[in-house]
Structure formats: C-alpha cells, structure tokens
Image (cartoon, rainbow, N blue to C red):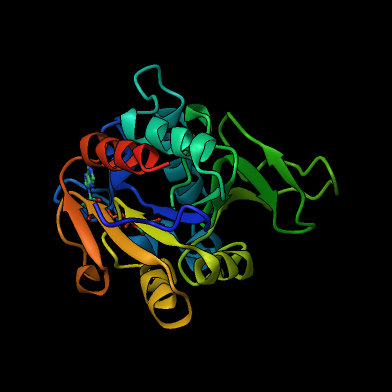
C-alpha cells in the first residue's frame, strides 16, 4: 500500500454498494431498485406533486425494509467506524445512502448528502423530525400545523444535495479520498474524485465490486465485496499509524 499522509484527514464517500451485504438493494445493479421502478415515478419533486401516495408508498416500504430484523451493519460499515476512531487527523464520512447503517455501526462524523429515510420534513416550514412509521398525505406538521406537506427527508433528482460546501472544503483539504460502493452515475458525488485531483493534494482510491464509471480518475482501486475490501484496506491504513 502507498504511504498515506497520516497528518491529514480522510474523506470517505459511500454509495448503495456498501449496504448491499446488509440486505439493502442497490439502484443500478441488474436486480437494483431502478430496474423495478422508474426514477420519474418515485424520486422527483414532480412525481410527489403528481402522485404523493405512490411516492410515500415507495419510501414507506423502504423505511420498513430498513427497520426489518434482518438488516444490520456489515463489516464494511464497522471498519469505517473503526477508521474514524483511530485516524488521528479525522475522518469525514459522506454518504449518498439514506439508510442509517453507518450510525448503527458507530460512525459519528457523517454527512447524509442525499438525506435520511428515518427523517421527515415539512415542505411548508422546513421542520425536520425523526420518522420510523409510514408517512401519508393526511399527516399534519407538528411545528406549523399544515397538512399534506410532510415528505421524506430525502434529496430527489432535481434537488440540491445537502452540505455541499462543507464536503467540498473537506475534499480539498484531505490527504486521502476513498470512494466505496458507488457506480459513479450521479453527480455531484461522481465528481468528488475530480475535485480532489484538481483542487486538492489527496491520494484517491476506489473500493467497489467492479470499476465504476469514473474508475480511471482514481490513483488506485481494489475490487471485491465491500465487507472484504473495505475491511482489509482499513486494517492496512490503521497498521501504518
Ligand atoms: N460491495 C461493493 N460494491 C458493491 C457491492 C458490494 N457487495 N454490491 C454492489 N456494489 C457496487 C456496484 O457494482 C455499483 O457500482 O455498488 C455500486 C452501486 O451503484 P448504484 O446502484 O448506482 O448506487 P449509488 O452509486 O449509490 O447511486 C447513487 O443514485 O438513485 C440514486 O439517490 C440514489 O444515492 C443514490 C445515487
């Protein structure tokens, strides 16, 4: 393994692939979510305006799936929590995932750039609450009292991902950027490796089941299931300390 500057922070980006071995579907693999439903029907503001019940049903089912007894963090989530505990200059974990498996594994410095399935947001006043049950158009916001405006706190296609300024600052300052389990189809996350290349000095590595669309932009790559490659890579990093 190349020597990594241990005096600089690490930025980790994760995508659906890291949660696959925890029992959650990815989006663009052969059996992925977007092979069963169309983005335009469930994951845009227009879809929600047109058919809120359908959109709520889609996220209600995913929320219940996430809370199912068989879904739990896998060794890759746990390895990233361990990295956070050990790396002296700090680790910022940026996830595109709306599940809470990083938190359950113990990660604390975490940005959910595409939002969180276990939170609801009122479109009328912006109030955000935790949410474990089903949402419906009958729901009334507990903060402003308006009905029919409570939606999943997730970022839909056409909406701005969350905390981009903080993420970009971290990418430019990091000594290592690790991208895990993401196909590189969706921007801005797919462009993070370019930000590191152009505006930062960090080394970059992709850990994925197969080469992503942006694979050639990375300095290094390791391919295999996240539970194996992430665990091994984190062990090697921590061994350098
Ligand atoms: N270990 C590691 N990688 C895996 C595994 C595994 N066990 N299983 C699948 N993968 C890889 C796939 O090879 C693929 O490259 O994970 C990647 C998953 O890609 P996508 O399904 O496109 O998921 P992601 O990149 O997270 O999608 C980005 O798209 O629809 C939106 O908002 C949604 O956040 C999501 C965004």
How many numbered marks are there? 0
- The answer to whether 198 is drawn above or below residue 132 in the figure is below
Residue 115 percent coordinates (x, y): 55, 52
Q: Which residue lies at the image location 33% right of the left edge and 28% below the top edge?
A: 74
Residue 183 percent coordinates (x, y): 26, 60
Quadrant, the C terminus: top left
Along the line of sight, which residue is nearer the eye, 25 or 167?
167
Please state if 48 lies on the left or on the right of 211 as rendered. right
Outermost bottom residue: 198
- The answer to whether 187 is drawn above or below residue 78 in the figure is below
**Residue 237 shows in the view:** yes
Outermost right residue: 144
Residue 178 percent coordinates (x, y): 36, 56
**Residue 60 shows in the view:** no
Please state if 127 lies on the left or on the right of 17 as rendered. right
Outermost top residue: 69
Q: Which residue lies at the image location 50% right of the left edge and 63% below the top edge?
A: 174
- The answer to whether 209 is drawn above or below residue 220 in the figure is above
Quarter of the rendering containing residue 192: bottom left
Q: Which residue lies at the image location 84% right of the left edge and 44% below the top edge?
A: 143
Please state if 229 lies on the left or on the right of 90 as rendered. left
Residue 141 percent coordinates (x, y): 77, 44
């Amino acid at each position: 393994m190349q020597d990594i500057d241990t005096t600089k922070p690490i930025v980790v980006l994760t995508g659906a692939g890291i949660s696959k071995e925890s029992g959650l579907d990815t989006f663009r693999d052969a059996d992925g979510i977007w092979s069963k439903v169309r983005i335009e029907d469930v994951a845009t503001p227009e879809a929600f305006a047109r058919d809120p019940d359908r959109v709520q049903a889609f996220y209600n089912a995913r929320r219940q799936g996430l809370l199912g007894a068989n879904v739990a963090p896998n060794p890759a989530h746990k390895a990233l929590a361990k990295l956070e505990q050990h790396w002296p200059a700090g680790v910022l974990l940026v996830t595109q995932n709306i599940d809470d498996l990083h938190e359950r594994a113990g990660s604390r410095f975490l940005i959910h750039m595409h939002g969180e399935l276990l939170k609801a947001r009122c479109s009328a006043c912006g109030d955000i609450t935790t949410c474990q049950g089903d949402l419906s158009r009958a729901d009334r916001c507990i903060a402003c009292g308006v009905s029919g405006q409570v939606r999943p706190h997730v970022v839909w296609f056409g909406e701005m991902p969350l905390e981009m300024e903080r993420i970009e600052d971290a990418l430019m300052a990091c000594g290592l950027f690790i991208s895990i389990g993401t196909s590189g189809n969706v921007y801005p996350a797919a462009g993070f490796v370019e930000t590191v290349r152009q505006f930062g000095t960090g080394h970059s590595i992709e850990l994925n089941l197969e080469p992503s669309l942006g694979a050639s932009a990375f300095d290094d790559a390791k391919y295999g299931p996240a539970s194996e490659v992430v665990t091994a890579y984190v062990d090697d990093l921590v061994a350098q300390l």
